[in-house]
Amino acid sequence: MFSTELATAQALAAGGTQVCALVGQGISQSLTPALHEREGAAHGIAYRYLTLDVAMDRVTDLDLGALLDGARAAGIRGLNVTHPFKQAVIAHLDDLSPDAARLGAVNTVLFDEDGARGHNTDWSGFARNLDRGFGSDVAMDSVVQVGAGGAGAATAYALVTRGVSTLHLVDVDRGRAEALADAVRAMANGPVTVTADDLRGAAGRVAAADGLVNATPLGMADHPGMAVDRSWLRRDLWVADIVYRPVVTELVRTARQLGARTLTGDGMAAFQAVDAFGLFCGVDADAARMLAHVGELVAAEDAPALRSA
């Protein structure tokens, strides 16, 4: 799998081009390659960013360890990792950054002379997007998060760092929600109440919450739909989505129709890319420039919809 892409990477790297790539399922429409490559050009770096899009029916067949070995052998500098591999990739790494170890999820892999090191830039990307989109304008006492996978670990940690006092974690797999709840309690620096439930118990939690976060892939182009019932949404419930392809997901669109405050995932995508670019290239990315570039890409591909309301 991906022999053509790895051969391309090897040829580029041999010619002095820095090569990185994104690994995931349903990522053909990702804006990340253009985002990284333009920032590289702004720094005068010869830089190519490839996509390794795993077909849905091949996810269970993928030998992730072999892919990492092949990427490193081809001269790829680093990989971004997305759904559904953020947790599975850990078994194939030599080391983890403190954030990645704390979260039990990796979205960035850096190859160097010591091997493959995993990092997590999702949590800071989500936290910075919350700050930018909502600031102190919304209540954060009680928040429901749907999704307790790799991305969910990052968003949950970000939420408790931003002062959420009661966090309700909901997942189709209650056991996974309970495991993340235990991890979040251990990660929190101050007092925080964290509960776990499956979707059957979520409606009541949402009814009493200030905000709702979608940390599932539902809403992506290859995973259409919403993770919650539309009847759970209301005007005074703010809604944040981590999905950014499309930017205006069905969840965001429905919440806006009710007059709710919303936050889309493009800001998180930009901020996590800022940190990943710094790891890959060894120079600080310009966050304002990368945010603006995401806006340009969205405007070119999607419609004139506002990204937060």
Image (spheres, rainbow, N blue to C red):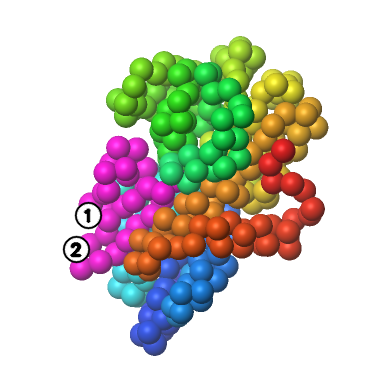
Image coordinates of residue 98 in percent, x first then y, are 26, 44
User: Dot 1 corresponds to which residue?
Assistant: 94
Image coordinates of residue 46 in percent, x first then y, are 45, 80
Asked if residue 272 is among those painted magenta in the image, a careful observer would answer: no
Asked if residue 109 is among those painted magenta in the image, a careful observer would answer: yes
| Magenta residue span | 93-122
Query: Is residue 271 toward the left or the right of residue 16 in the image?
Result: right
Image coordinates of residue 225 in percent, x first then y, are 69, 37
Is residue 20 shown above or below 123?
A: below
Q: Tell which of 221 and 233 is nearer to you.
A: 233
Q: Tell which of 15 and 88 is nearer to you.
A: 15
Residue at x 76%, y 34% (from the top left corner): 256
Q: Residue 244: tell me if it is visible.
A: yes
Is residue 195 shown above or below 25?
A: above
Residue at x 79%, y 27% (from the top left corner): 258
Quadrant where the image shows the C terminus: top right
Q: Earlier in the sequence, mark 2 or mark 1?
A: 1
Residue at x 38%, y 55% (from the top left corner): 108
Image coordinates of residue 150 in percent, x first then y, are 43, 40
User: Dot 2 corresponds to which residue?
Assistant: 114
Is residue 175 shown above or below 71?
A: above
Q: Secondary structure at mark 1?
A: loop
Callout 1, which amino acid?
Answer: Asp
Q: Secondary structure at mark 2?
A: loop
Q: Tell which of 200 and 148 is nearer to you.
A: 148
Callout 2, which amino acid?
Answer: Asp
Q: Residues within 10 Å of mark 2 (few under 14, many from 20)?
A: few
Q: Residues within 10 Å of mark 1 (few under 14, many from 20)?
A: few
Check the image and name the residue furthest to the front. Answer: 136
